[in-house]
Amino acid sequence: MTRDVKYLAEPTGNIYETVVILSKRANQIALAEKKELSKKLEDFKSERDTKDEVFENKEQIEISKYYERQPKPDIIAITEFENGELYYRKANTEDIVK
């Protein structure tokens, strides 16, 4: 889906700031999803599994497929931004250590 860059830049006044905000939020979402998936798949890990011998079952495959079908983190971040659901603030130049 194509998005209007001017519309995305309106809240911050600068498209580059918007891109940074969206990038950071997408990374947060991706990390949270990765942790959640790893935790669920950890239940299937067994002591005898090796790199050569990996046991897969239907439930494990379905969990992986579920996460593959989820919206991508960048799409979620853009939607949250457009709906005004993201909190962001500019760092004060006085707070930045030189």
Image (spheres, rainbow, N blue to C red):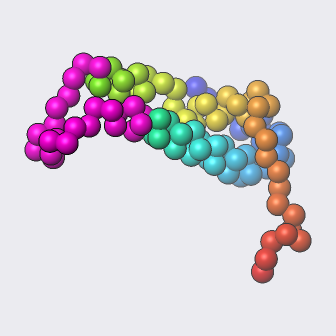
Which residue appears at 36% of the width and 24% of the height?
63
Quadrant, the N terminus = top right
Q: Tell me: 1 left or right of 57.
A: right
Please indicate, yes or no, whether residue 30 appears anywhere in the rendered image: no
Q: Nearer the viewer, residue 8 or 6?
A: 8
Residue 88 spot, x, y in % from top left: 79, 46
Residue 34 spot, x, y in % from top left: 45, 40
Which residue appears at 71% of the width and 38% of the height?
5
Q: Tell me: 29 left or right of 54.
A: right
Q: Nearer the viewer, residue 88 or 56?
A: 56
Quadrant, the C terminus = bottom right
Query: Which range is magenta?
Result: 37-59
Q: Is residue 52 magenta?
A: yes
Q: Nearer the viewer, residue 72 or 95?
A: 95
Which residue appears at 79% of the width and 77% of the height?
97
Q: Tell me: 38 left or right of 77.
A: left
Q: Which image quarter: residue 66?
A: top left
Q: Nearer the viewer, residue 31 or 46?
A: 46
Please indicate, yes or no, whether residue 87 appears anywhere in the rendered image: yes
Residue 68 spot, x, y in % from top left: 40, 27
For this orientation, the residue located farthest to the left is: 52
Q: Is residue 58 magenta?
A: yes
| Number of marks in picture | 0
For this orientation, the residue located farthest to the bottom is: 98
Which residue appears at 15% of the width and 45% of the height?
50
State the predominant SS element of the stretch in magenta: loop
Residue 94 spot, x, y in % from top left: 89, 71
For this orientation, the residue located farthest to the front is: 47
